[in-house]
Structures are given as C-alpha cells and as structure tokens.
Image (cartoon, rainbow, N blue to C red):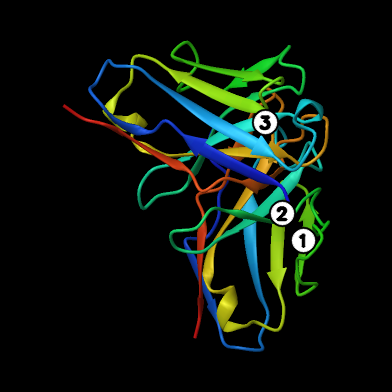
Amino acid sequence: QVQVVESGGGVVQPGGSLRLSCAASGFIFSNYGMHWVRQTPGKGLEWVAFIRFDGRNEYYADFVRGRFTISRDNSKNTLYLQMNSLRAEDTAVYYCAKEIYGDYRGELVYWGQGTLVTVSS
Amino acid sequence: QSALTQPASVSGSPGQSITISCTGTSSDVGGYNYVSWYQQHPGKAPKLMIYDVSNRPSGVSNRFSGSKSGNTASLTISGLQAEDEADYYCSSYTRISTVVFGGGTKLTVL
C-alpha cells in the first residue's frame, strides 16, 4: 500500500540547518509531485513547498523562500527538504504528502506521520 | 497569501447535518476548482476527504460532500457520527502557484 515516511527532525539552534527526508513506497514516485506541509503544535496547517514529478519546478511559501529547498531523488523514491537559517517560528511537525494526480493541483493524498522540528537555543 | 477563512468551531448532535464554510478570494477558491477538505484527529496526520470541490477519494463515506459558490467553499457532513469529531481544514490552489489552507474548524459532536 502507499506509504510515505518522514525522518530527520530534531532539535536545532536558531540559524542552524536540518535536512528532512521522506521515503515513499507503494506508488510510482517519479509520476507524482510531492509537497511539504507543516503544523505548529496546537495550530493549523501551513503549506511549505511543492516539487514537480520530474523535479524541474519547485514552488515555495513566502515565509521559507530563500531558506528552504525542496528536492527529490526519483532513483531512491525519496523527497527532501533542506532547511537553512532556521528560526524559532519554524518549530513544527513537518509532513510530506503526495499530490493526488500527476499535475500540480495542491490536493494532497497520502500523508506521512510527520517529523518534529524544534528550533531552540 | 492570507489563510482561507473558516469558523473556529461548529457542533452538532448525532444524526444531524453540519456545514463548514471556507472563504477565500478570486485568486484562490473562486478562481480554481482545486479545493480540498482534510480531516485531522488529534495526534494523527490529515486525511483527504474531498478534492476538486466535490469529489470523494475512494473509501470516504458519502456522508461527506463538498460544494462551492463564488469565493466560498463548503463541506457538509450528514448523519453526524461520534467518529466525525475532529479538526477540518480546507485548502485551495492559488493564482501564484502556491497552496493555501484555512485556519481549521473544530467539529464537536454533542
């Protein structure tokens, strides 16, 4: 069955970096765009970034543009989120999720369980 | 990009119907039919309940339905059940090729 599993979260100091990974299985990874979404503890969902199925285009929320980079390795069925210049307000659970169809619609099916990123000194 | 506007909370009794609204602008909800709804139980990942305004993924109960009028989308849950108690979020594709979520609505089944 379809599965996406995030990893790489942890505690990092302000200004630090972290790379999240998302291992996908159960579907043809190279056919689908993928998203990162975050959720601050006790609060709502925030879309972070999207990458096309072939990795040729990336899209970002304003609050992470220039600091975060989404990428993918279709040979490894893995999605990444490189997070630099981290701030306290980036503290959240980060989810990866599969786009429902091959094109970019922003409709997310199959979410992972999330990985917690805590930015604190 | 501002978040879509949802009521903070709604409630209903078992068997009743409730509707959650999601208001955006012509740059998101009103401009595209890529409106989705997600259910999230405490400590769990969100689950897609409605996509393309009114379509249900396989396995989602037909008690859940979606619609849109102008810049406002709506999620209706009929025959309310205790297991429906959860947070619900809407989302939309936007004119600037991003995705925007609503602030979330807590559904309480009385």
Q: Look at the numbered disc 1 and give the secondary structure of its residue.
A: strand
Q: Quadrant of residue A117?
A: top left
- CA gap between label 2 and label 1 equals 7 Å
Q: Nearer the viewer, mark 2 or mark 1?
A: 1
Task: Give residue B73's mark.
Answer: 2
Rendered residue at 81%/48% (across/down) = B52
Kind of residue at disc 1: Gly
Locate residue A26 relative to residue A4 in the image: left or right. Answer: right
Quarter of the image with the N terminus of chain B is: top right
For residue B70, above or below residue B39: above
- Expressed as whole percent of the image width and height from the top left, the position of residue B58 reads 82, 60
The residue that mark 3 highlights is A34
Kind of residue at disc 3: Met
Q: Residues within 10 Å of mark 1 (few under 14, many from 20)?
A: many
For residue B2, above or below residue A112: above
Q: Judge if badges 3 and 1 mark residues of a common chain.
A: no
Q: Look at the numbered disc 2 and give the secondary structure of its residue.
A: strand
For residue B13, above or below residue A81: below
Q: Nearer the viewer, mark 3 or mark 1?
A: 3
For residue B89, above or below residue A21: below
- Mark 2 — on which chain does it sit? B
Q: Judge if badges 2 and 1 mark residues of a common chain.
A: yes
Mark 2–mark 1 CB contact (< 8 Å): yes
Upstream in the sequence, badge 2 or badge 1? 1
Rendered residue at 76%/23% (across/down) = A53
* Of B95 and A32, the residue lying toward us: A32
- Mark 1 — on which chain does it sit? B
The residue that mark 1 highlights is B66
- CA gap between label 3 and label 1 equals 24 Å
Mark 3–mark 1 CB contact (< 8 Å): no
Kind of residue at disc 2: Ala
- Expressed as whole percent of the image width and height from the top left, the position of residue A116 reads 38, 40
